[in-house]
Image (cartoon, rainbow, N blue to C red):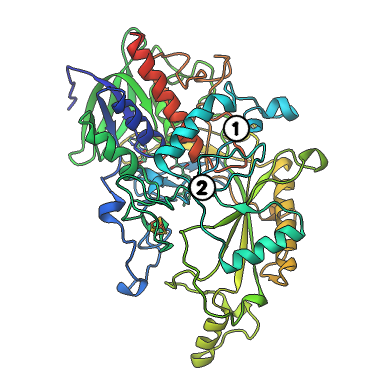
Amino acid sequence: MLHRRQAPYDVCIIGSGAGGGMAAYALTRAGARVVMLEAGPAWYASKNSQMLTPAYATPMRGRATHTRPFGEFDACDGGWEIDGEPYTRASGTKFDWWRGRMLGGRTNHWGRISLRFGPEDFRGKTRDGLGDDWPIAYEDLAPFYDQVDDLIGVFGSKEGIHNEPDGKFLPPPKPRCYELLVKKASDNLKITCIPSRLSITTTAKPGRQACHYCGQCNRGCSVKANFSSPDVLIAPALATGRLTLLTNSMAREVTIGPDGLATGVQYIDKETGEDRHVAAKVVVLAASAFESARLLLNSRSSLFPQGLANSSGVVGKYITDTTGSDVSGFIPAMVDHVPHNEDGVGGMHLYMPWWLDNKKLDFPRGYHIEVYGGLGQPGYGFMGGIQRYPGKGGYGAKLKEDYRRYYGATIGFSGRGEQIPNDKCYTEIDPNVVDKFGIPVLRFHWDWTDNELNQVKHMQETFRALIHEMGGTPFSPMPTKEQGYGIAAGGRIIHELGGVRMGNDPKSSALNRNCQAHDVKNLFVADGGPFVTQANKNPTWTILALSWRTADYIAQQRKAGAL
Ligand SMILES: Cc1cc2nc3c(=O)[nH]c(=O)nc-3n(C[C@H](O)[C@H](O)[C@H](O)COP(=O)(O)OP(=O)(O)OC[C@H]3O[C@@H](n4cnc5c(N)ncnc54)[C@H](O)[C@@H]3O)c2cc1C
Ligand code: SF4
């Protein structure tokens, strides 16, 4: 049955993650009456987190489950596969898509690595002729990055590195013991190594406590010291009295009036199974980059036969993920160490931003290095692979002794690099498959180029050099060219972006420089869809800043009577 509301909301936002939460926060503060459709149930870390549950508290010992692939106590409900909501891959394509299905989406779990894009990241084509430039510059986004820093909180250190802009930082935590070893090795190899930048409050903020260094950020923080959209953005938006939140509401398509403007959103009430409609004067898509592309491609009509906002044909194209590769190794200097306090945030205290000049290398764009190791809380699968250490594990008392000796003697590095969009990476509607709601699903095509493969080879060589410099031994041999130098499959780094890109030319972009559809002036996208390129930075701080900028533009246009 179709329900139609008479009085339209000012704005309908689809999705409540980083992009949707930020848009709801800013628009309700600007006085708009907002309705938010979220496909998953409500969840607040401040009420529902299992931050302090010990692993031995359940028979599973924290083991991964089908809907919590990062562990039983992990905050995020979702995963690589969602029952009844498939996606498909073209023949030969290796691509995986990680989706969160709950209030706050993936911000309940994410690593909180919160890096600004730098001035060079917005002008890749001008720099080396590859990919495209953004229609905006760093200066356009800088005031919004500042606002996000102030509101949400991010720790870090002022470094003055041109393409790694400093923010308005809270004090960073001190490096842990193993991180000091990493720092020494990096200094010896002349690799820049600086305090990490994570959205965790190391000093208290109003209504949020300072981090107490329990290290369980992925479970959600009950004292709201780390950022998640429900506690930090949605709750204050609800407190204005201007946000109507409809959870368990799966958007099917954006509806259009005879004048070609968006009239609202058709969605499925998952609790009753009913098809419903919510009317709104402005629609903001923030369902995550590829879900937003899917919604547009599924919103076909006689006015928009190729899908909505797609007269250019670019919706679903220019999609990217961060490149990724890892190496871990055994570090004898950390064996039988003096017991010491390694409490800290649930993530690294140091990282390495890109430090080299690509003009002197055989790949055009850089990567940053993330560091892991230390004395994490033991749980299911603890120190699996102990046979790789000298002494080779064993049974009974000997095995227990080895666990004690080698606990903390592993250090690893993960590279996170920039992919340049290419013609072989795109997504489209699969004409033969629908999900359990009858909504057509996405089919993915993916292929890396030598730009990424050469970059990943460099990562592998660098990580091995770092491990050797610390006196250690990598656990695995260098992957060969035939093995793609160990590159993770597309989508695996969970930084998927693009598909609804912004640009000045309506023939080659879906959105203008304000993330407003060229074809439909009351339609906006506020997630990773508008990104023109990746950078070698994790994307969420830029999604937040861009969403706030978009929301401000909508508020201005409403005030001016243009929307
Ligand atoms: C394990 C992990 C670690 C990560 N670490 C980092 C990191 O350290 N730094 C970083 O910058 N990024 C990181 N990310 C990525 C980060 O989580 C995403 O960039 C960010 O959450 C994207 O925000 P979003 O609003 O676009 O999408 P999401 O957060 O995914 O939110 C989208 C929301 O839309 C809802 N939705 C989808 N379709 C519909 C529909 N049809 N109708 C209604 N609702 C819908 C979903 O249920 C979801 O709640 C990580 C992600 C994961 C999973
Ligand atoms: S480490 Fe800090 S931010 Fe993370 S869950 Fe613990 S208290 Fe919260």
Picture layout, residue 390 above or below residue 217: below
Q: Upstream in the sequence, badge 1 or badge 2?
A: 2
Q: Is residue 276 above or below residue 201?
A: above
User: Quadrant location of the C terminus?
Assistant: top left
Mark 1, residue position: 533
Q: Nearer the viewer, mark 1 or mark 2?
A: 1
Q: Is residue 528 visible?
A: no
Q: Quadrant of residue 219?
A: bottom left
Tell me residue 230's x, y (percent): 31, 43
Q: Residue drawn 57% across and 85% down?
A: 393
Q: Which residue type carries mark 1?
A: Thr
Label 2 CA crowd tier, 10 Å (few <14, some 14–19, many 20+): many
- Residue 314, given in percent of the width and then of the height, sits at 54, 23
Left or right: where does residue 540 sit relative to residue 42? right
Where does label 2 land, which residue?
96
- Residue 300: horizontal and vertical position, in percent? 39, 20
Q: How many neighbours does mark 1 have within 10 angstroms: few (below 14), some (14-19), or many (20 or more)?
A: many
**Residue in the picture at 48% in, 34% down:** 146
Amino acid type at circle 2 is: Asp
Using the numbered discs, state the Cα–Cα distance from disc 1 to disc 2 in whole angstroms: 20 Å
